[in-house]
Amino acid sequence: MVPHLITALTGPINELEARVLDSMPAIERWFRLEWMEHTPPFYTSVDLRNAGFKLAPVDTELFPCSFNNLTAEMLPLAVQAAMAAIEKICPEAKNLLLVPDSDTSSSFYRANLQRLVQVFTQAGLNVRLGSLDPAITAPTALPLPDGESLTLEPLLRTPRRLGLKDFDPCTILLNTDMANGTPAVLENLHEQYLLPPLHAGWGVRRKSRHFESYEEVAKKFAKLLGMDPWLINPMFGRCGEVSFGDASGLDCVQANVDALLGKVRRKYKEYGINEKPFVIVKADNGSGGAGLMTVRDAKDLADAAGLARMRERLGTVRGGEAVTELIIQEGVPTYERVNDAVAEPVVYMLDRYVVGGFYRVHAERGVDENLSAPGARYVPLAFSDSHHLPKAGTKPGVSAPNRFYMYGVVGRLAMLAASYELEATDPDAEVYD
């Protein structure tokens, strides 16, 4: 199943797909060389947008929490990737401590944890769950949608290690994005592998820093393929000191919105794109789809009503933290449809391998809006065919393996950018003069 691409502007993406397929050996070699120099994040999910004239990542998560949306057919890939990752990091590992988010009330999130336990158990590890919630003082059953249950246990901290009662893990896998800062119980663990590292959490990460790294990666990749990096790269700006209380810093937002819209208009003119550009203003840190608004004209932010909308939509991120830093990102419309509903592909990776993906679908949202919102549903059918086996010579735009191989390539570019980003923010990085 290839979701219908509802746009007349399919030329550039079809050309990109053809170019990617023709360059497959060079692309895979290029990735191999990059991974000789850089360490991939332990696991990654990337939200993509296909506008027909442009394909670009719009968000990269380093603590993905929708593994339950991958089909059963994708499990062998995930298990093999998990084996490769663990063997590389801690080959003698037998115990894995999975630390979920402190809020496990969502049945969808619990199903995600169930899938992670399944993957790493089949990879040959004893997996148990340790809770950051101080209210968990004894083993607690978490009911699952299929009638099964998981057991959450209280964490036990010694001066140098973290574990559970009668359970001492070599490796600790975090599935919480630490949007409200790093939990003290996770700090100063020097004898165990913490995956991903603490500086991958939103207390340290910034989306603008990630897209700076992605811009560097996109330029390298575009040079390899002899193409315009804009076709895979969303332009952006940043405002680092914003207060919605006294409206300070909002002139920076207006200026960035106006400048970025001008750049996008020039690109649209260059490619003959008859669309009205827009930008997305969102929190530079945080996740969960909070703190985001669509803007088509800088003047919309100039009056009291515009300020009120910004305060309402951008004032806080998940967890209630006040937003003081914003990223202004080129809006990439999504022209893919699943059953006439707006859809965007999401690519899931474990270590350096694409293990699957799905479509996030929202019947009540537009092509220029955030789809990670209440009412979204997830359709894994689009990735039921292997995206590792593209079909050379097939007409661009109609082959599922070809479409999804291209998505996997752009997803891996974003993952590589996350690797660059984590290296740049690593507090324990070795410095060579």
Image (tube, rainbow, N blue to C red):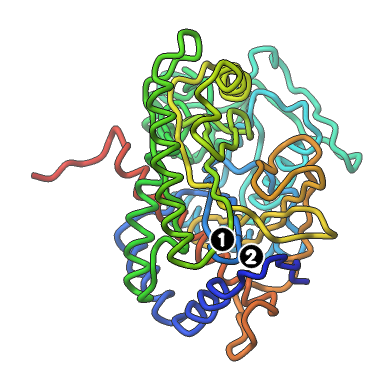
Compare residues 142 and 8 and report the one nearer the observer: 8
- Evaluate if marks 2 and 1 touch, with contact meaning CB atoms under 8 Å apart: yes
Q: Left or right: where does residue 83 sit relative to residue 103? A: left
Q: Which residue is mark 1?
A: 81
Asked whether 427 or 283 is in front, the reply is: 283
Query: Which residue is situated farthest in the left direction here?
Result: 433
Mark 2 residue element: helix
Seen as rendered, the residue at the extreme top is 246
Q: Please give the residue where the numbered disc 2 appears in the rendered image.
A: 77
Q: Is residue 46 visible?
A: no
- The reply, left or right, for residue 282 in relation to residue 152 is left
Residue 251, how many percent across, how many down?
39, 23
User: Where does the image place residue 358, in percent across and percent down from the top left?
Assistant: 71, 57
Label 2 neighbourhood size at 10 Å, few (<14), some (14-19), many (20+)?
Answer: some
Rendered image: mark on residue 264: none
Amino acid type, label 2: Leu
Instruction: Examine the rendering and report whether any part of residue 320 can be seen.
Output: yes
The structure residue drawn at horizontal position 34% and vertical position 74%, both measured from the top left corner, is: 224
